[in-house]
Amino acid sequence: MSDERLQKLEETTRYEPGEVERRLFAEWIEGGYFHPEPEGTAAENYSVAIPPPNVTGALHMGHALNGSMQDALVRMNRMRGRNTLWTLGTDHAGIATQAVVEKMLAREGTSRTELGREAFVERVWEWKEEYGSRIVEQYKRLGASLDYENERFTLDEGYVKAVHRVFKQLYDKGYIYRDNYMVNWDPGSHSAISDLEVVNREVEDTLYSIDYPVEGSDRVLTVATVRPETMLADTAVAVNPDDERHADLVGQHCILPLVGRRLPIIADEHVDPEFGTGALKVTPGHDLNDFEIGRRHGLEEIGVIGPDGRMNEAAGERFAGLSAAEAGEAVVAALRDEGGLRAEEPYTHSVPFSERSGARIEPLISLQWFCRMDELAAPAIEVVERDEVRITPPQWKRVYLDWMREIRPWCVSRQLWWGHRIPVWYCDPCEETYVAEQTPERCGACGGELRQEEDVLDTWFSSALWPFATLGWPEDTAELRAFYPTSFLTTAREILFLWVARMIMTGIEFAGDVPFRDVYVHSVIQARDGRRMSKSLGTGIDPLEEIDKHGADALRFGLLAMSSTQDVRFSDAKVQQGADLANKLWNASRLILLNVAAVEAAPRPRGVEDRWLLSRLEATIASVTAKLEEYDFAHAAAEAYAFFWSELCDWYLEIVKPRLYEGEAEVSATLLYALERILALLHPMMPFVTEEIWSYHPARRGHLAVHPFPEPDGSRRDAEAEAEVGEAIELTRRLRAWRDLVEAPAASVLPARVEGIEPREFVGRLARFEFGQDGGDPVAAVGPVKILAGAEIDAGAVAGRLEARREELRAEVKRAEGKLGNEKFVDRAPPEVVAEERQKLERYRAELEELSE
RNA sequence: GGGCGCGUAGCUCAGUGGGAGAGCGCUCGCCUCACACGCGAGAGGUCGCUGGUUCGAACCCAGCCGCGCCCACCA
């Protein structure tokens, strides 16, 4: 070690993450450690495709958590020597990105429509080039060991090829088709959206009851609606086929108030006779249920609300041009005038809203592209049933399967400009449709000009291909052979259907294998007050701020430690614990590195304490490794912390300090060995501080990021050493507690003698007792240690202490005696449990007798 | 309307059949030559409620009370 570095190590008593993290990250990049060559097979290699963040996005706590988990496993496997790829990339995020750029244009006083499609898309690309890499830089701050040399984007050239290939193949198979169908129309983004992008919220509306007169009769059928404006598009009235009240009316007609249209009265199972009067107005053009009823009965489909959310000409002169809400009021007013409004009452029900724009969904019939899912779903169900894709925690397996078994066609077209434009061309004169991977020149039939489909694909259509499209599919690339299928996926449960399910389906269909072997569904980190973290609520906690304040290692450790299968609140204390651990690592390492004697290759345990430490170390390595492998990050973090802090620092380092200061070779070797292993074990969770300390370690030959991960060494487990040192530690604790109780001054050394076997040397030293003293009656006994009278002890407290302990013991004896006196317990409990209870009783009785002398 | 989950120390959370745990906070004592972002010692819990199963229940079963999430086309 150079004098300069030695001096720095000596002087720096507090670990400062800021400067260290930037420097080390640059070193890792320079080393090229995160970029693998596409060699070997996927079975030997290790790969993960990052869930691509939106280009519009900034790193939020979910990314930070998910990134910490992925990096822990990725780094562990890289250290194990596996050829490891963690694929980096971003998602073009159709609606979100288009919205951001549209907002920007609005500030400039222009708009999307003013620019025109081509110029608009160009502006989005410019925006992407300028701002789209922000989140990538933020992943670097976290220390994520992604392959930054090869960044993918769901709209890059190769990716477009993959999307077109998939679309064409699905079309050729007959899965993709175009249809006039009811979709969730989002008036906010002016596009259809999928069922999964709709959120239902409870809304208080008014339920109106309206009389529909029966043609040629005095009777009326009273129907109920929360959306009176939709009556303008009614084309039938339906009753339940078993409803005797209305049975005679089926086949007759009603007259639609305000409009005068004749509405057939039909019978349909869907109608609930218990609701209202049992008569349902049927609006196939603006309600999904009614749409289905309409298709069953061949009803006319009238649309009175347009894509802009306003009434069109079909609504009639009185209402055309009004917004749907205005039209509703106007309809109610008109009905009041005519006397057709029978009742109105407050009504709370759930209403669909667009998750994207927040607008109330307008169910509309429109011409859209759909993908049939049944055939794709079948094998994706099987692989999960057979655990070829394992879902953890296991309750999500059923959620996945339930959803997949009920899967419905997917509306894949979106009326946006930013995205994969659907690779379909129309020839208007001869009405031909071409689906092609590359733009066709002219119509094959008439030679006429072709017009490309205006719509783009749902963003999730392209993200569904992520694990293989990023590896170069549809080309047969070395990357695909080396890294597909990927090893695992960690994800939030909210995109289990939106994304995970679809990747499994496309992976099997197009890449010939499942996209990953394991899916780990992680917890959601909530705000400190238990609310959802959200930008709009202002409850978000910025991971970058946490990194600035405490360091990336602290945040990573904190997130892993607070993670769970349950949702948890963000815990500042856990992040602080991480920061404290980094500082403790630094300082314990200073103690070791600045005091060790000659460099030794292997540990040479001398005393039982050394064997104890090495045994505990190996137990910890085995356990932490197993926890990481089963995605139990919280316990992995907690166990590593507990071993290091308590066993290594609080006990072992204190025990061996005299030997260390004397420059003993054996203890130096043991300490350097333990330090190397614990640094490597912790590196996947806290890469920066461990790498920094490693740079001072005499055994260092390269970066810790590519240092071998410790394999648990069972040969160093030593039950005898653990038991012997464990007892000595326990005795030390009891002696310390005793002296605290009698208020012995902290610095004083108390006289005592030992009956029986002399305890290990460190017991007296750490508890501040001088054993081997003669004379006088003991004032107290703590195990084999008889404490002698000293001037500095409060005699009254001693007596009190003795009596308190006796009281405890009497209670324990009573409890054990009671239990053993219970014949049923002795008969039916397992023998070892009974034996254990007998041993305890004997121990308590012995101690009680000792204290009663 | 279905499904999943939660209720354990002041706070945030572990703990799935044999004597209640961690971190933070709190109390007391220590600037002990790695670290005061530290060291040592403590206090603090009818494990939501009620029944049941068991020799034995925080843990298994049933019901109830609170809270959360997901799915669902009831006007």
Image (cartoon, coloured by chain):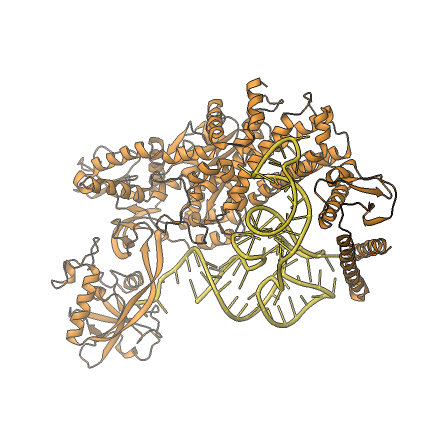
Chain colours: A orange, B yellow
| Count of numbered circles on the image | 0
Relative depth, front residue between A367 and A787:
A787
Left or right: where does residue A784 sit relative to residue B9? right
Q: Is residue A44 visible?
A: no
Residue A789 percent across, percent down from the top left = 82, 46
Residue A806 percent across, percent down from the top left = 79, 57
Position above or below: A95 against A284 = above
Which residue sits at x=51%, y=38%? A554
Relative depth, front residue between A519 and A344:
A344
Which residue sits at x=19%, y=62%? A326
Relative depth, front residue between A307 and A492:
A492
Left or right: where does residue A683 sit relative to residue A611? left
Residue B57 percent across, percent down from the top left = 66, 63
Left or right: where does residue B55 sit relative to residue A267? right
Which residue sits at x=41%, y=42%? A542
Quarter residue A433 falls in: top left
